[in-house]
Image (tube, grey):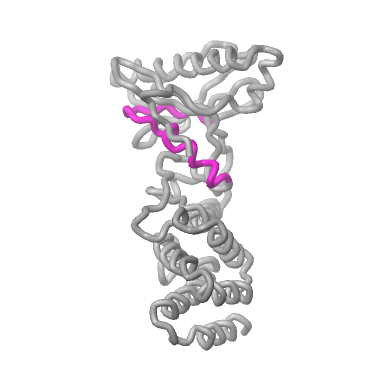
């Protein structure tokens, strides 16, 4: 994974495809530089007013009328602990424009991780580091999420659960305000799972493939195949069972805590029971995994 080093790089990513279409036959590198200068000027203006003790929500950014021949408008959306977000509309296309108020690379540092969790993370396109009053800040352009469905957070947590198990992706601050329409919109909290427990990177390609199949069984609620794969893994790939044991145990935050009665949490506990039994079989041969599987299978088929 390519890491962002602000001592070497000043920007990351590319202009959104919709905007690249607007530049026509123009040189992409030149147009990208123009785009970054445009956004950096807005970010610097934001910090100019911020340095004058203007509250983020009261800052009024004066946008140039045109970019790539298109009308530009800005609308303040919200401010979090690190940055402020605007809806920037360029012609017919709207994006989220986040300006970090703290000296942090923010989204740029985690942008490479988004490829490992495409369905979970709101798409970040391009961002850049800039200097203001001798300190470095950053801005980033992402897709703008207009609406939010009722089950958006629950949907995101399911995606996170499977990304955690199969790709080692985690989120430091998983609460509803950081998600919208089933996607993470506050991306600096994106991270990889702690190596303290059996990490997906420690498995072979064959074992990772088995883990992905097991996760798919949970998604599709295929208990029979899940049990079959786990039974084989006990004998042939015990590292898979160990990984699943830790991943399923530590992937569960408050959303999946014991006692939750929603359909997904209830389903997880059934599959976790199979993994727990398999782990006991590996740690103490003769623990009777087949009998436990048979019992669980009977409960599943009722």
Q: In the depicted view, which residue is nearer to us: 207 or 220? A: 207
Q: Position of residue 282 (x, y in %)?
A: 43, 77
Residue 164 in the magenta stretch? The answer is no
Residue 109 in the magenta stretch? The answer is yes
Image quadrant where one finds the C terminus:
bottom right
Q: Relative to 234, is 170 above or below?
A: above
Q: Is residue 94 left or right of residue 239?
A: right
Q: Of all residues shown, which one is farthest toward the right?
A: 25
Tell me, yes or no, if residue 217 can be seen here.
yes
Q: Is residue 205 left or right of residue 279?
A: right
Q: Specify start and end residues of the magenta stretch as a single range.
A: 96-118
- Residue at image coords 29%, 16%: 134
Q: Relative to 72, is 150 above or below?
A: below
- Residue at image coords 66%, 24%: 92
- Residue at image coords 63%, 23%: 19
Q: Relative to 238, is 247 above or below?
A: above
Q: In the depicted view, which residue is nearer to us: 198 or 192? A: 198
Q: Relative to 114, is 160 above or below?
A: below
Q: How many marks can you see?
A: 0
Tell me, yes or no, if residue 254 can be seen here.
no
Q: Position of residue 130 (x, y in %)?
A: 39, 19
Q: In the depicted view, which residue is nearer to us: 8 or 171? A: 8
Q: Position of residue 285 (x, y in %)?
A: 43, 83
Q: Position of residue 55 (x, y in %)?
A: 33, 25
- Residue at image coords 44%, 26%: 139
């Amino acid at each position: 994974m390519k890491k962002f080093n602000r001592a070497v790089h000043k920007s990351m990513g590319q202009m959104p495809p919709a905007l690249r279409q607007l530049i026509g036959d123009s040189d992409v590198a030149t147009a990208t530089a123009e785009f970054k200068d445009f956004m950096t000027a807005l970010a610097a203006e934001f910090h100019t007013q911020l340095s004058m003790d203007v509250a983020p929500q009261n800052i009024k950014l004066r946008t140039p009328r045109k970019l790539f021949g298109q009308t530009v408008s800005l609308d303040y959306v919200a401010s979090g602990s690190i940055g402020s977000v605007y809806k920037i509309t360029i012609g017919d296309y709207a994006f989220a424009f986040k300006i970090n108020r703290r000296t942090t690379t923010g989204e740029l540092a985690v942008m490479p991780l988004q490829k490992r969790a495409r369905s979970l993370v709101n798409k970040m396109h391009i961002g850049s580091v800039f200097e203001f009053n001798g300190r470095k800040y950053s801005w980033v352009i992402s897709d703008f999420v207009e609406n939010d469905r009722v089950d958006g957070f629950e949907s995101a947590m399911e995606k996170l659960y499977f990304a955690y198990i199969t790709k080692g992706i985690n989120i430091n601050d998983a609460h509803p305000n950081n998600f919208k329409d089933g996607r993470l919109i506050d991306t600096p909290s994106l991270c990889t799972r702690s190596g303290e427990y059996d990490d997906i990177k420690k498995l072979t390609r064959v074992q990772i493939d088995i883990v992905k199949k097991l996760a798919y069984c949970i998604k599709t609620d295929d208990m029979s195949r899940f049990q079959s794969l786990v039974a084989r893994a006990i004998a042939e790939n015990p590292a898979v069972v160990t990984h699943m044991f830790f991943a399923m145990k530590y992937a569960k935050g408050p959303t999946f805590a014991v006692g939750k009665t929603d359909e997904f949490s209830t389903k997880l506990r059934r599959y976790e029971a199979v993994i727990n039994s398999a782990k006991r079989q590996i740690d103490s041969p003769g623990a009777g995994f087949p009998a436990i599987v048979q019992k669980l299978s009977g409960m599943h088929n009722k």
